[in-house]
Image (spheres, rainbow, N blue to C red):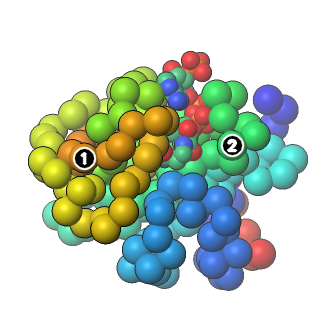
């Protein structure tokens, strides 16, 4: 990895839909949070990962979407982006939460990033989608919630800037 940069995207957020659709199945669901959410894009040369975070009130942030371009997965990009995002909000919010499928690879990714499982919603995916959602060869059923307490600000080794697309 050379010198990754995280851009805080304020305009033309829909340009990132191709990658956002990797993290969330339906464009209609993405539309519910994209404009009110903060969109971070990690570039290392070209675009590698995206993350959308919403303010849920009471000091709680929620990761609504996180995805790394399939060609660049398992190279540390999403975990570095999550670290940058946590640092961005540190000192101003208490915790970051998220809900995801009960998929061992995804859960171990988030646990490696510092998240812990809080609870599960049984049958969430089977009840909210009229077709099977398959992730890592697993048909999603329950939704798993995780949280990470944000401490004080650490030094980040990635540049962060507001970017126009
Ligand atoms: C989940 C996702 C964002 C991870 O992105 P990434 O850039 O590949 O993640 P990283 O390279 O930073 O992974 C860091 C560590 O997490 C763990 N990890 C990541 N993906 C994993 C997987 N599929 N299976 C098992 N462990 C995994 C590994 O320990 C990895 O370190 P290692 O490669 O040195 O073993 C990516 O796989 C993705 O975009 N998936 C599709 C969308 C999605 O499911 N998003 C999450 C739900 S919102």
Image-based side of 94 in relation to 121, left or right: right
The local crowd at label 2, few if under 14, some if 14 to 19, many if 20 or more residues have their Cα within 10 Å, is few
Ligand 1 quadrant? top right
Q: Nearer the viewer, residue 134 or 33?
A: 134
The residue pinned by badge 2 equals 70
Q: Is residue 79 left or right of residue 104?
A: right
Mark 1 CB lies closer than 8 A to ligand 1: no
From the viewer's perspective, is residue 77 above or below residue 14? above
Q: Which residue is located at x 37 percent, y 27 percent?
A: 104
Q: Where does the image place residue 59, in percent across and percent down from the top left?
A: 22, 59
The reply to whether the residue tagged 2 has its Cβ within 8 angstroms of ligand 1 is yes
Rendered residue at 32%/33% (across/down): 115
Residue denoted by label 1: 141
Residue at x 64% of width, y 59% of height: 19
Assign the C terminus to one quadrant of the image: bottom right
Q: Residue furthest front?
A: 131
Percent position of residue 12, x then y: 68, 81
- SS for tag 1? loop
């Amino acid at each position: 990895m050379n010198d990754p940069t995280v851009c805080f995207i304020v305009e033309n957020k829909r340009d990132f839909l191709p990658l956002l659709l990797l993290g969330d199945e339906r464009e209609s669901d993405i539309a519910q949070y994209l404009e009110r959410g903060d969109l971070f894009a990690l570039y290392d040369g070209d675009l590698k990962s995206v993350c959308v975070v919403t303010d849920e009130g009471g000091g709680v942030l929620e990761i609504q979407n996180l995805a790394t371009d399939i060609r660049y997965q398992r190279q540390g990009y999403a975990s570095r982006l999550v670290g940058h995002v946590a640092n961005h909000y540190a000192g101003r919010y208490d915790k970051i939460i998220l809900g995801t499928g009960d998929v061992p690879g995804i859960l171990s990714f988030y646990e490696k990033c510092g998240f812990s499982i809080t609870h599960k919603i049984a049958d969430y995916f089977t009840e909210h989608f009229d077709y099977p959602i398959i992730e890592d060869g697993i048909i999603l059923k329950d939704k798993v919630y995780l949280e990470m307490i944000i401490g004080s600000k650490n030094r980040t080794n990635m540049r962060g800037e507001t970017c126009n697309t």
